[in-house]
Amino acid sequence: QQPVQSPQAVILREGEDAVINCSSSKALYSVHWYRQKHGEAPIFLMILLKGGEQKGHDKISASFNEKKQQSSLYLTASQLSYSGTYFCGTEPSSSNTGKLIFGQGTTLQVKP
Amino acid sequence: DTAVSQTPKYLVTQMGNDKSIKCEQNLGHDTMYWYKQDSKKFLKIMFSYNNKELIINETVPNRFSPKSPDKAHLNLHINSLELGDSAVYFCASSPWGASTDTQYFGPGTRLTVL
């Protein structure tokens, strides 16, 4: 079952914050976040494991709410370089094969 | 020093033809994957291999056949190409194929079937 991301698209000014959500109807073991710029490969951002942990580096962080089977990606004080499409990839609890089911993506555009 | 490389980068071909895409990783990883990204950017896993053994085999037409001659290489052969096969195909690799692994993607191969 494909996770659902929201919003589908967001436009920000430099310095503004954004939150991207990823929800699944299945129990999850891990959530992976990637960013893809137009015409390029997806680039890994971070992994969150069940247990409700929160991670972050620089001004990008994420949380995983195991009860809600939802992960949120937080982009703080956005920069032009944050523009791109963000994907969450989820792996069900029973898997452990590295089989990621990706959401439909959230397009983020940061304007000067 | 490219980590995951794919050839060719672009592939334009006629319906009915057979084509192959090659992937190589120099990260020393055990697991490699093929993904298909359609025109709506939907990224879907097709196959994975761990040390030459097929692990993930999604519901994909049997015209698609992956081959892994060794753990650093994973090729994708497509027979009797159809219009709907047009997409960007990404190869990826990860250390062991575990849930906690980071997957590293190659630059992609844009396949256009006319």
Image (spheres, coloured by chain):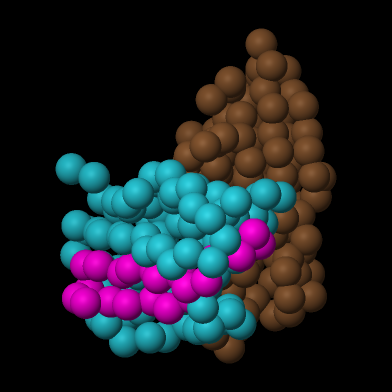
Chain colours: A brown, B cyan
The residue stretch that appears in magenta: B64-85
User: Taking the image as drawn, is residue B51 in sight?
Assistant: yes
Above or below residue B78? Residue A40 is: above
Q: Position of residue B28 (x, y in %)?
A: 19, 65
Give me the residue at 58% from left, 22% from top. A79
**Residue B78 colored magenta?**
yes
User: Taking the image as drawn, is residue A63 in sight?
Assistant: no
**Is A110 in front, or is B4?**
B4
Above or below residue B112? Residue A75 is: above
Q: Position of residue A32 (x, y in %)?
A: 55, 60
Rendered-image quadrant of the N terminus of chain A: bottom right
B14 on left or right of B98: right
A29 on left or right of B28: right
Above or below residue A91? Residue B62 is: below
B48 on left or right of B87: left
Dividing the picture into quadrants, the one containing residue B97 is bottom left
Dividing the picture into quadrants, the one containing residue B84 is bottom right
- Number of numbered discs overlaid on the protein picture: 0
**Is A99 in front, or is B91?**
B91
Q: Position of residue A94 (x, y in %)?
A: 58, 88
Dividing the picture into quadrants, the one containing residue B82 is bottom right
Give me the residue at 78% from left, 38% from top. A9
**Residue A88 colored magenta?**
no
Give me the residue at 52% from left, 37% from top. A39
Rendered-image quadrant of the C terminus of chain A: top right
Give me the residue at 47% from left, 73% from top. B79
- Which residue in the rendered view is the most extreme toward the top? A112
**Is A93 in front, or is A101?**
A101
**Is B25 in front, or is B86?**
B86
